[in-house]
Amino acid sequence: MMRPPGRRLRGLIRKEFLQVARDPSSLAIAFVLPVFLLFLFGYGVSLNSRNVPVGVVLEHPDTASRAFAAGFLGSPSFAPYYFASWQHAREALRRHRVDALVRVRGDFARGLQAPGGAGIQLVLNGVDTNTAQLIQGYVEGVWAAWLQQQAHAAGAALALPVDLRVRTWFNPNARSRDYLVPGLIAVIMTLIGALLTALVVAREWERGTMEALIVTPVSMSEILLGKLIPYFALGMGGLGLSVAMALWLFQVPLRGSFWVLLGISALFLLVALGMGLLISILSRNQFVAGMIAIIVTFLPAFLLSGFVFDIHSMPLAVRAITRIVPARYYVDALHSVFLAGDVRGVLAMDALALALIAIVLFGLSALRSHKRLD
Amino acid sequence: MSLLRRILALTLKEFRNLLQDRRSRMALIVPPLIQTLVFGYAANMDIHRVRIAIYDQDGGGIARSFVARFSGSPDFSVVSHVRNQREVRRVIDEKRALGVLHLGPDFSRDLLQHHAAPVQILLDGRNSNTAAIALARMQRITQQFDRDWTRQHGQRAPPASLEVRAWFNANLDSHWFFVPGIVGLLILVATMMVTAMSVAREREQGTFDQLLVTPMRPVEILVGKSLPGFIIGLVESAVIILVAVYWFDVPFRGSLPLLYAGILLYLLAAVGMGLFLSSISATLQQALLGAFLFMVPAVILSGFATPIENMPRAIQLATLLNPLRYFMVVVRGVFLEAAPPALLLRQFWPMAVIGLVSLTTAGWMFRRRMY
C-alpha cells in the first residue's frame, strides 16, 4: 500500500492530459481565451482621452480671445471645433458632436483689465462623469498655461500664490493601460481557472464516468488532485502567456521581481481552480456549473476587484463583500508588483488572504465530495 | 387563428421549459436583482474621502489653514501626518495614502512676500484614474485658496477664471452614468442566455428534428422561440428601470415611449444574436460558450465603463456591430439628457438591422444545419 497511491494519481493525471489532448476545448480555454481577451481589452479599454472634440465659441474674435483659444489647438488632448454662435454650439453638444464647450464672451478683452477678471465658460456633457472630469482637468491645464504666459508677458513672475508641483509615482504619464492590463490579467485568470475546473468534474458526473471511477480503488482526494494538477499546469501556461503579452505587447513595466509575480500568481490560480472545483462538485451539471462560474467568479472579479472601480469609493457594505472576492487581492498584488516593486507589506497581506481562501475552498471541496451515488 | 395558436403553444412550452426547473427559475430571477443592487453601488468612479497624508515642514497658521481646506473637504480624509521623506515613501508604497501634500519650510514666508509658494503633491499612480481625479480636486481646492488669498491681501486676481458647468449631471454623480447602463447589461445577459439555450438544447436532445416535421413553418418556430426572450427582457428592464429611478434616484428626463422603442429594438438584436448562435451550435455547451464569447466583448466594447472614443480605430469600427453600444446611448440619452429624437433615431436603425439580419440567418440555419 506504500507505492500504489502515487501510481494511481499519476494514472489519473495521465488520463486527464489525454482527455485534454483529445478534446481541445480545454486547451482553447487555457490558451486562446486569455490571448483573445487580453488583446481585446488591452486595446479596447482605455481611460486616456485624446482628441476630445471641443466646441469653441469666440463671441468677439479679437487678439486676446484668439490667444486663449490657441492653447486648445496646440494640445494633443483636444480637437477644437469653432462655432459662430452659442446657439449652434449648444445644439452640437446635445447631438454628441462635441463633448464640451468653451465660451469666450464678447467682453473678454475688457474683462481682463477689470479688477474681478474675465470669465471663461466651460460647459461639459456630464453624462460620462469620468470623461467630463478628465476634460475639465485638461481645460484647467490649458487655462493655467495661458495664465502663466500672461503673467510672464506682463513681467510678473507669478500668476497664482500657491504653485502646485505634481509628481505621480509609479505611472508618471498616467497611462491607464499600465494599471488596467495587470487588473485584466486577474479578471481573465479568474475566469479561466474557474471555467477549466468547473466543467470537468460536472462532466464526469453528467457522462456517468464518475460512477465508473467510484468503483475503482482511487480515493476522492486522488480524483480531485488528479483534476487539479493537470489544469494547474494548463492555467500556468495561460498565465505565462498573459504576462508575456503585458510586458512585451502592452509595454507594462515589471518593477517587482519575477519570482514574486510567479509565486502570487500560482497562489491565485490555485484559488481560481478551487472555486471552479467547488462549483463543479456542488452542481454536478455542466450548464449550471458554467452559469454559476460566470456569475460568482467573473462578474465580481470585474466589478468588485478594484480593477476599474476603486474599492475605497464603494459603500461600506459593498466594501465588506469585496473582502471575499479573491481577485481583489490579486489585483492589489499585481498593481504593486508591476508598477511599484516588491512592497512587502502589501504583498504579504495579499498572499495571506489568498492562502486562507484557498484553504477554505479546498476544505469545502473535500468535505462536499463523497463517493456516493444519489 | 391557427397560426397564432401554434406560436402561442410553442411559446408556452418554452416558458414551461424555463420555469419548471427550480434552479433555472432562480437563475433568471435572483441574479439580476442582486446584480442591479451590487453593481449599482460598486460601479462608480466618484472619489470619496481619498486618503491623503500631510508633510508640513512649515507648521505655521497659514500652512494649517491651507491643509484645513483639504481635511474639511468631503473628497479627502487626512489619515496621517508624516515627518520625513522616508515616511512619505512608506505611506504611499503601502497604500496607506493615495497622495501626500508636502508644504516646504518657507511656505508662509513665500506667500507673505508675494513669491510663488511651492506645494508638492505626490500621488500613487498605480490607479492612475483615481489619481487624476483626485489631482483635479486638489487643484480646485488650491484655486479656491488662491482666490481668497489674493482678495484678502489686496493682490490682483488672476485676469481670467473658469466657470465650469456640467449639463445633464450637474454634480457629476457617476451613479447616474452607470446605473442606466446596467439596464442594457443585464437584459443582454438574460435574453442571450434564454435564447441561446433554446434551439441548442432541442438539438442536443433530438427534439428539434421533431419540431421541424410538425406543420410549423420556420418563421413560426422563430417567432415562438423569440417571444420568451422578448418577454423576459421586457419584464427585467421594467424592474431595473424602477430600481434605477426609485432606489438609486437617477433622474428620468426623457420620454418613456422612446425608451421602450429603444428597448424593443435592442431586444430584437439580442434575441436575434442569441438565436443565431443557438442555430449554429450542435450542443448546449457550444451555444453557451458562443453566447459568452459574444457577451464579454459586447459589454467591454459598449462604452459601459470606458468611452468608445478612446479605443483604437479598428476596434471602434468593430463596435458598430455591437447592439449594446447603441443602446447605451439610448438609455443614457433618455434618462439624463431628454435626448432629441434625431439622436435616438441614429441609434435605432443599426439595432433594427442587426436584429433582422441575425434573425433571418437564424431561421435559415434552422433548416440548413442538421445533425
Image (cartoon, coloured by chain):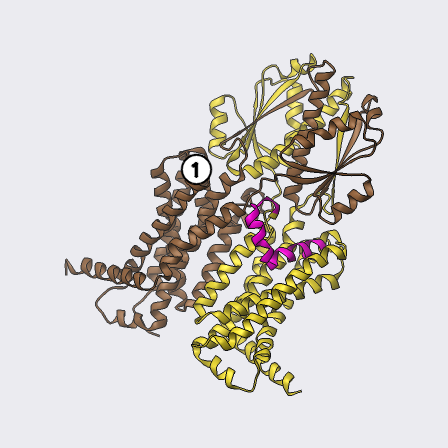
Chain colours: A brown, B yellow
In the rendered image, the vertical position of residue A127 relative to residue B51, given as above or below: below
> Residue B172's image quarter?
top right
Q: Which residue is mark 1?
A: A338
Residue A272 pos. (x, y %): 40, 53
Q: Nearer the viewer, residue B360 or A200?
A: B360
Q: Nearer the viewer, residue A206 or A102?
A: A102
Task: Give the percent coordinates (x, y) of residue B90.
Answer: 47, 28
Q: Position of residue A211 (x, y in %)?
A: 29, 72
Q: Residue at x 44, y 80 (%)?
A: B206
**Left or right: where B197 falls relative to A157:** left
Quarter in which the C terminus of chain B is drawn: bottom left
Q: Is residue A14 visible?
A: yes
Q: Residues within 10 Å of mark 1 (few under 14, many from 20)?
A: many
Span of residues in magenta: B309-333
Residue A275 visible in the snapshot: no
Q: Is B330 one of the magenta-colored residues? A: yes
Q: Residue furthest top?
A: B113
Chief SS of the magenta region: helix
Q: Position of residue B170 (x, y in %)?
A: 73, 43
Q: Chain of mark 1?
A: A
